[in-house]
Amino acid sequence: MRIKNETTRLPRIARGRSLTVLVNGKPVTAYEGETVAAVLLVEGFRAFRHMPASAEPRGLYCGMGICYECLVTVDGMPNVRACVTSLRDGMTIEAGAQP
Amino acid sequence: MNASSDLAIIGAGPAGLAAALAAAKAGVSVVLIDSAPRPGGQYFKQLPASFSGSDSLTHQGEVRQITEALAHHNVTLLMDTVVWDCHQDESDWLLYLFGTTAPKRLRARSIVAAPGAYDRPVAFPGWTLPGVFTTGAVQNLIKSQRVLPGKDIVVSGTGPLTLAVAANLVKAGANVRALLEASPIVKPKTLSSLTAMWAQWARLREGLDYVSTLLSARVPVRIGWAVVEARGRQEVEEVVIAPLGDDWRPDKTRQQVMAADTLVVGYGFTPNTDITRLLGCRHARRHARGEHIPWRDRDMQTSVPGVFAAGDGAGIGGSELARLEGHLAGCAAAVYLGRMPRLELERLRVSDTARLARERRFAAALDRLFTPGSGFDTLADDNTVICRCEQVRLREIQAAVASGARTANEVKGLTRAGMGNCQGRICGSLVARAIAGAGATTEELDSVGSFTPRPPLVPLPLTVLAEALP
């Protein structure tokens, strides 16, 4: 969920210009400057991927590019860290699929 | 394209920025490298460039001041860039870089390592479930992305950052169901004075603000309690909490279950030492929690001449100590490079001695209060994943030890723990303590050693490796 200026006591901010990305084929409106992880959480994804063999779900954990748990497929490139990848207009994101 | 400079600084947080400014002012040519898109590190984590608004959460004014000052000197910023290998080449260091605008290699005569720290991993049943986040992840989501990690949130951890995260979640409008301060030696009455002590050290108004935010939102606070298990099928659905004994051993006979979709855990920080270990700097364990830190002389120089280390990556001390150490390291590098008279460094060291000592005293006090005891290692059961990347469970590590493995590298070879994408950054200290056993001394942990870092330090596209070949 995005934090709204109207309902937060945090300092007010303005997000970047809006853009559209495709999350598992579905067009989603997001904002320049947001990360892939942020838009996935906003879209209700918790499991970003499932482990090979065990099929255990994994999601965002360290949030700063250290742990490599939040790997998703971006524009056809697998194993991209969602937490440190910024959105671009028209980006395609594949996440959460069972192996 | 290859590039060269007098000094390469790895990490553009408080320590790296201070080192860059100090060295550049002395006439040293500096390349400052960071994997993030903007300088500042985790402490000065900035809003994305395309966002605008108040900076009171992120201290953007401070980081802007420093970067503007850097612009007047011979400093090249390489953002979005990682160092994936580094070795000596005659009298220089050769750094291998990966980044959109970075040269493939950088030649430097001296290095300041300021890689910072990350949340200290603690393994417990269910810690790999989606919905379990570190405090660092949640701070980033709130401060930099303005996104909430979930709806019904339990925060379990220790130390000032746990308070900060819980307060920020409340301010952001989240339902914080409980804040658990795990340290059993923190008493309710001392919590506010501790916060004040930390706040003097960092920022007075912020610290007091956290406490009043939590009090006014009536967030239930339990001291000496922690989450001992996260449960759910595909994500967190509930958490199990329990009180801790003096050595942080959970009393599972008194455990309770709480519904929650999100668990935030933060048990202090681990210095990021892969660069200093790769460079061959001598490391030692500071205490039985097991983190390695590089040995340094009083000018921040490591055991390898010309290689300096500053900030949380050389031992957790917070942003103010990082700044002081970075400044000293930058000056010491300038002396090493012949751009600053040694006398000036001596003078600086004398004038900074009291401030350095004060920051280190605070760091030591926080460390005593907020470092998990050995009983916390009993959280993981036989089936708990220790190495998240390679899915190695505690019983597999114990089996390797039973079959004769005594060092971290031997367990790595037998089980694959530490061989995955994160290269042991998350499981390194967990594996070391699993080998040494509960209650191990610092010396016993030292004999276990740590995973040997190997290039590439981070996963890379094969084309990058192919292009790096001579």
Image (tube, rainbow, N blue to C red):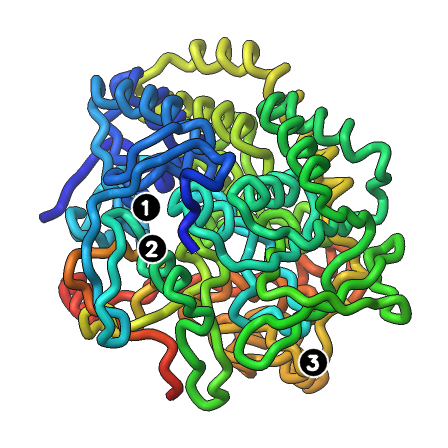
B339 with respect to B450 (left or right): left
Q: Secondary structure at mark 3?
A: helix
What residue is drawn where x is 20% and y is 24%?
B74
Write down the residue under mark 2.
Answer: A84
Report the disc number at residue B398: 3
Query: Looking at the picture, do discs 1 and 2 lie on one chain?
Result: no
Where does the image place residue B457, in percent across and percent down from the top left? 37, 60
Report the disc number at residue B206: none
At label 2, counting other C-alpha atoms closer than 10 Å, the crowd grade (few under 14, some 14-19, many 20 or more) is many
Camera-side residue: B283 or B458? B458
Q: Amino acid at mark 3?
A: Gln
What residue is drawn where x is 50% and y is 27%?
B325
- Find the residue positioned furthest to the front: A6
Residue B279, visible in the rendered structure? no
Q: Amino acid at mark 2?
A: Val
B265 with respect to A60 (left or right): right
User: Alpha carbon of mark 1 to alpha carbon of mark 2: how far?
Assistant: 8 Å
Vertical comparison of B215 with B328: above or below = below
Tell me which numbered mark, 3 or 1, is placed earlier along the sequence. Answer: 1
Tag 1 subunit: B
Vertical comparison of A22 with B381: above or below = above
User: Alpha carbon of mark 3 to alpha carbon of mark 2: how far?
Assistant: 35 Å
